[in-house]
Structures are given as structure tokens and as C-alpha cells.
Image (cartoon, helix red, strand yellow):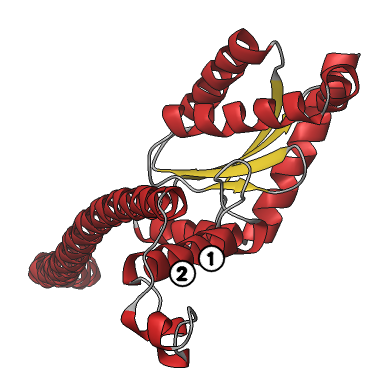
Amino acid sequence: MQAGREAGRVARGAHAHAEFSLKKRKGRKSGAPKKLEKRLGALEARQRDADAKERAATERLAVVEGRERASDARDRALTERDSLANERDRRAAERDALANDRDRRAAEREAVSSTAQVRRPSPGEERNGGSASPAEEGQEDPALERARLEAQLQRAHLDGLTGAYRREVGRLALRNEIERARRSDGRFVIAFVDVDGLKGVNDREGHAAGDKVLRTLAATMRANLRTYDPIVRYGGDEFVCGVAAIDPSEVLHRIGVIDQSLRQATGVGITAGLAAMEGNESLEELTERADAALLEAKRSRNN
């Protein structure tokens, strides 16, 4: 009897344990889908955030590309305007030079003819005993007056010996070219040129021979540079020229051609120092670097 009751308790305990295990397994099975759903939801949220960031980055990139295209279009427009301005300046300079030359020749012809012929007295001179009236004396031939004024203007801006710019006017021309270069592709080179041994030429052959060397150099520089590249007589035998939109290697090549041409014509050469514009460098800074490069080239050649 006692043994039967004990067996019953064991059986009931085993049954209770089995029910507990079954409930526990059911609980585990019901909790797993919820955790999986949470993980999937988190992954989907992260994916949405990533997609949104990618869309925003794409939109920003499109905006940047649009700005770059607009900037390129503006740069091209500025370059075209500068090219047209340079061409207009070149043609204007050529027209002015031709007009000045015509006026000078006309003035010379009239001056020669007036001195070669004996002028008849005017009626006013006959009435005044051979002297012109004050009103007539104050009159001057318009062509001669224009030629005189043009000559004064030329003397004020150009060096009388070489035809290059005088220093102060030349510096203004160089600054204008620098500003145009900044609006264009940013390329601008200063070449500081010095004649080799000009003092020796003056001592051996006289100053007339030295002047011929300087005139030949200026003409050779004009022949090998563009008509609108400023050439400035900076000192006695020193010249500065500015060249835009050309690489320094090409400028160096042209300087070499000028040197060889001058040697063939006069037996005298040149030494040059080049400096290419960097950033917002001023004309003074650029000229100082070109001058330093010239001195270094002279030292290297002497060594």
C-alpha cells in the first residue's frame, strides 16, 4: 500500500516535469519569430538610411558638377572676350602706327618742300612792308601741327632710340597684360633681358655702334614676339618683355632665337632671366624674380 502511494507520487512528478518542459519549449518557439522580426526591421531601417544618404550624395554631386560646368562656361567666355580684346588692341596699335607713319612722312615732305621753295609774300605781308600780320603769323599748317603733336605723344610713351616702351608706361602695359592673363588661363612670363658686353662695344667702336646694337635688339624682339607683347626698355642695356598664354619653355625658345639673330647681326648676344607668374603675384614680385634669374644665369655662365 505504501509502495503504491510512492509510485503514484513519482508518476505525478514525472508528468509535471514533462508538462513544464513542453511549456518551456513552446515559449522558446513563440519568442524566436519576434526577435527575428525586430532584427529584420532594424536592417530595413539601416538600409533606408543608407539609401537616403546615397541619394543626398548623388544630389550634392550633381549640384557640384553643375557649378563646375557653369564655371567652365564663364571661363571660356572670358577667354574668348580677352582674345577678341587682344585682337582689337593689336589692330588698333597697327592702325595707329600706320597713321603716325603717314603723318610723319607727310610732315617731312611738307617741311622739305617749304624750305626748298621761296615763298611768295602774301597780300598782308606786302601791305605791311614784307611782314605778315599777327593773325597770319599765328596760323600753322594743320598737318604740321598734328605731326608735331603726334611726335610729342610718341616721345612721351616710347623710347626714342629703340621704339620700346619707356619704363613707367611699360610697367602700366605689363600690369594690364597680367590682369588679362589672370582672367584667361593664368599663364604669364616676364623675361628680363640684358645685352652682353655693350660697354665693350661702346669703348671699341663708339656709342653709335652701341646704339645700333640696342636698336637691332628691339627690332629682333618685336619680330619674334607677338605685336601686343609689351617690350620695355628698363635701363641702359636692359629690356623687360611680358608674354601671356605661352609656356615658359616656348618663351625660352624665342629668347634663344632672338639671341642667335642678334649675334649674327651685331656679334653681340644677350642673357635672359625668366619668371612665370604664380598665384596673385604682383608685377614687382615677378620682375624681381626674373631679375634674380638673370643674375643667376650670368653667374652660371661666368663660372
Tag 1's secondary structure? helix
Q: Quadrant of the C terminus?
A: top right
- Residue 302 image position (x, y, % from top left): 89, 16
Query: Would you name the residue on which mark 1 appears?
Result: 152
Residue 288 locus on image (x, y percent):
74, 50
Write down the quadrant of residue 84 in the picture. bottom left
The amino acid sitting under disc 2 is Leu
Q: Which quadrant would the N terminus be assigned to in this image? A: bottom left
Q: Nearer the viewer, residue 122 or 7?
A: 122
Residue nearest the viewer, comparing 37 with 230? 230
Q: Residue visible at 10% across and 65% down?
A: 29
Q: Is residue 90 above or below residue 6?
A: above
Left or right, 135 with reference to 53: right
Q: Is residue 199 left or right of residue 237?
A: right
Look at the numbered discs 2 and 1 and tell me whether their residues touch, using CB distance below 8 Å. yes
Left or right: 215 with respect to 47?
right
Please determine whether, in this image, residue 262 is positioned above or below residue 185. above
Q: Residues within 10 Å of mark 1 (few under 14, many from 20)?
A: few
Q: Residue 27: tell me if it is visible.
A: no
Splitting the image into 4 quarters, where does residue 89 fall? bottom left
Residue 49 position (above or below residue 101): below
Eyeballing the image, is 253 above or below 28?
Answer: above
What residue is drawn where x is 39% and y is 87%? Answer: 127
Foreground: 218 or 108? 108
Q: Judging from the image, what secondary structure is the residue with disc 2 in?
A: helix
Residues at marks 2 and 1, CA–CA distance in whole angstroms: 5 Å
Count of numbered marks: 2
Please tell me the numbered disc located at residue 149: 2
Question: Residue type at mark 1?
Answer: Gln
